[in-house]
Image: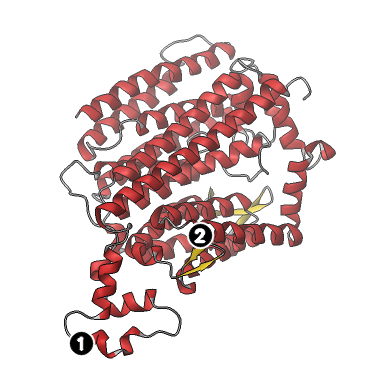
């Protein structure tokens, strides 16, 4: 229970900045600070306190820092949505409460993550269907065909698709980890696996290209592809997969720029937004003005002019945060997302099985890298991609999907080592047949199954090959150590990404501020 007590103390501590921030907005709006005017942050704290009690019962071993981090991000988000789009604040608040309830419901429904292994292909099919659905029945908003309309509501199915696809990938990688980590040839010093083992990489690459072409959604395509590459590297330790994946990404990016006009526009606006400051570059130019105006400490909650940015409450909410809370406030938000990444990957390192570890890795990346993409876009570090800032941007689909991810991370943490379940082996090498082993690792043209010695006696070639695979650094306890080392590298990578964001934010808000 010490973990839950820590979580409770962190929640109480987090309530102070959340309530004080909302109180500052109330005062700027000309109202009096009272229990009634502070009902939103107090009610939000009550909802998270109830969620804490549920976690105490349903997932007592879960990470104690994730829920408080989400509470602070959600509290800052609802404050700025209320300040920037008052007419949308009530609906956003209702969706936020529903999201907290959905998180608890997911924890209650998903007793353990083993169910993923049984239904991984079902999850994969559902994810692909949700991802591709807008192509056929979608509604175009702001140039992207990402939404579908149901009974007067707009839903972005891609937000839920990433949850199902991550779970499918986790199940697939857990089942084939050892086979995917075997390489029997070298090209330019890189160990290259058999071509058929690369087919999932090509499949994901193709799907991402379809998203860019037909849905005009550059952000989701980059997000899905990055999640897949990270999970593949964490699962196999083969840097060659990353090299091949980045090469495919470069080919796809060049092709998209050459043939797709909206990709060209995004790139040109990124290179020089002031060239068409009243047209295509208007959003990013106004974003830079707001950030520069904020400086080190900000202009104060409610005193900024971020409303000049179109759709500021959604894609550009971080620009408003940076203007009114300054570099210190914006940097604090980025540090919170960095801490979320660290705690999520720590959960993956503690996970009792490959399945839980890969699920936690992918789900953490889905939140953390999405935050990097949108903040990097609005601060002009990278081309603008148009994804939402998790837990903070206005939008129901993103909020609901993000809280489902939090629930699954808490579940993965509750199943971690050191509790009732023992550490399980890596992959399922013991369950596969000799034919599968031979076909996976045999060089082209070799057929172990046709060799007489292969099926003779108890010491077959397949059995010998199985022992070789089980003796590799990716097997047994050594495999867990190798996995933990790769997750440590992933922690450093995400820490570096957010450090770069903070450095770039410092450049925009302090060093370059007067020029802007």
Viewer-side residue, 188 vs 104: 188
Expressed as whole percent of the image width and height from the top left, the position of residue 432 reads: 27, 72
Against 384, residue 22 (above or below) is above
Mark 2: give few (<14), some (14-19) or many (20+) Cα within 10 Å. Answer: some
Q: Which residue is drawn at 49% across and 59% down?
A: 130
Q: Which residue is drawn at 42% across and 35% down?
A: 340
Instruction: Let me know if residue 169 appears in the view.
Output: yes
Mark 1: give few (<14), some (14-19) or many (20+) Cα within 10 Å. Answer: few
Against 496, residue 25 (above or below) is above
Against 285, residue 271 (above or below) is below
Q: Label 1 belongs to which residue?
A: 456
Viewer-side residue, 283 vs 335: 335
Could you say which quadrant of the image residue 137 lies in? bottom right
Image quarter of the N terminus: top left
Considering the numbered disc 2 on the image, is that residue within a helix, a strand or a loop?
Answer: helix
Q: Residue at x 53, y 13 (%)?
A: 24
In this rendering, the label closer to the viewer, 1 or 2: 1
Q: Earlier in the sequence, mark 1 or mark 2?
A: 2
Q: Which residue is drawn at 68% across and 36% down?
A: 380
Expressed as whole percent of the image width and height from the top left, the position of residue 232 reads: 44, 57
Total numbered circles = 2
Is 90 positioned to the left or the right of 11 in the image? Answer: right
Viewer-side residue, 466 vs 211: 466
Image quarter of the C terminus: top right
Expressed as whole percent of the image width and height from the top left, the position of residue 506 reads: 64, 24
Q: Label 2 belongs to which residue?
A: 240
- According to the image, what is the colour scheme of the structure? secondary structure
């Amino acid at each position: 229970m010490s973990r839950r007590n820590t979580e409770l103390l962190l929640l109480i501590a987090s309530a102070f900045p959340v309530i004080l921030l909302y109180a500052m907005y109330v005062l700027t709006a000309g109202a009096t600070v009272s229990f009634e005017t502070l009902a939103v942050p107090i009610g939000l704290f009550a909802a998270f306190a109830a969620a804490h009690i549920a976690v105490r019962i349903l997932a007592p071993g879960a990470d104690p820092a994730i829920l408080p981090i989400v509470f602070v991000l959600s509290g800052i988000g609802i404050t700025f949505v209320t300040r920037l789009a008052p007419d949308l604040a009530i609906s956003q608040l209702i969706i936020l409460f529903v999201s907290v309830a959905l998180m608890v419901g997911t924890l209650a429904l998903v007793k353990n993550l083993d169910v993923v292994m049984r239904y991984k292909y079902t999850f994969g099919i559902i994810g692909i269907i949700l991802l591709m659905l807008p192509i056929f029945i979608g509604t175009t908003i702001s140039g992207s065909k990402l939404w579908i309309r149901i009974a007067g509501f707009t839903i972005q199915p891609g937000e839920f698709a990433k949850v199902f696809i991550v779970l499918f990938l986790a199940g697939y990688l857990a089942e084939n980890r050892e086979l995917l980590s075997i390489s029997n040839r070298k090209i330019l010093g890189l160990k290259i696996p058999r071509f058929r083992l690369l087919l999932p990489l090509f499949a994901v690459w193709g799907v991402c290209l379809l998203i860019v072409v037909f849905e005009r959604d550059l952000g989701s395509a980059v997000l899905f592809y990055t999640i897949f590459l990270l999970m593949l590297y964490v699962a196999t330790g083969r840097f060659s997969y990353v090299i091949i994946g980045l090469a495919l990404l470069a080919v796809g990016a060049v092709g998209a720029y050459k043939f797709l006009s909206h990709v060209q526009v995004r790139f040109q606006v990124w290179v020089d937004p002031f060239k068409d400051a009243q047209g295509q570059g208007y959003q990013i130019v106004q974003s830079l003005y707001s950030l520069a105006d904020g400086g080190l400490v900000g202009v104060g909650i409610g005193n900024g002019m971020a409303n000049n940015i179109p759709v500021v409450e959604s894609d550009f909410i971080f620009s408003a945060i940076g203007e009114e809370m300054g570099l210190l406030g914006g940097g604090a938000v980025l540090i919170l997302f960095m801490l979320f990444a660290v705690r999520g990957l720590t959960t993956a390192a503690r996970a009792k099985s490959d399945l839980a570890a890969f699920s936690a890795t992918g789900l953490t990346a889905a939140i953390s890298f999405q935050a990097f993409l949108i903040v990097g876009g609005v601060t002009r570090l990278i081309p603008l991609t148009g994804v939402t800032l998790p837990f903070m941007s206005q939008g129901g689909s993103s909020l609901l999907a993000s809280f489902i991810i939090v629930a699954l991370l808490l579940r993965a943490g509750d199943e971690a080592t050191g509790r009732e379940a023992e550490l399980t082996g890596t992959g399922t090498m013991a369950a596969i047949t000799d034919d599968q082993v031979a076909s996976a690792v045999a060089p082209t043209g070799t057929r172990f199954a046709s060799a007489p010695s292969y099926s003779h006696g108890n010491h077959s070639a397949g059995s010998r090959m199985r022992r070789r695979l089980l003796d590799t650094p990716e097997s047994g306890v050594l495999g867990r150590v190798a996995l933990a080392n790769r997750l440590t590298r992933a922690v450093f990578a995400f820490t570096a990404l957010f450090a770069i964001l903070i450095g770039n934010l410092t450049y925009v808000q302090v060093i370059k501020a007067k020029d802007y």
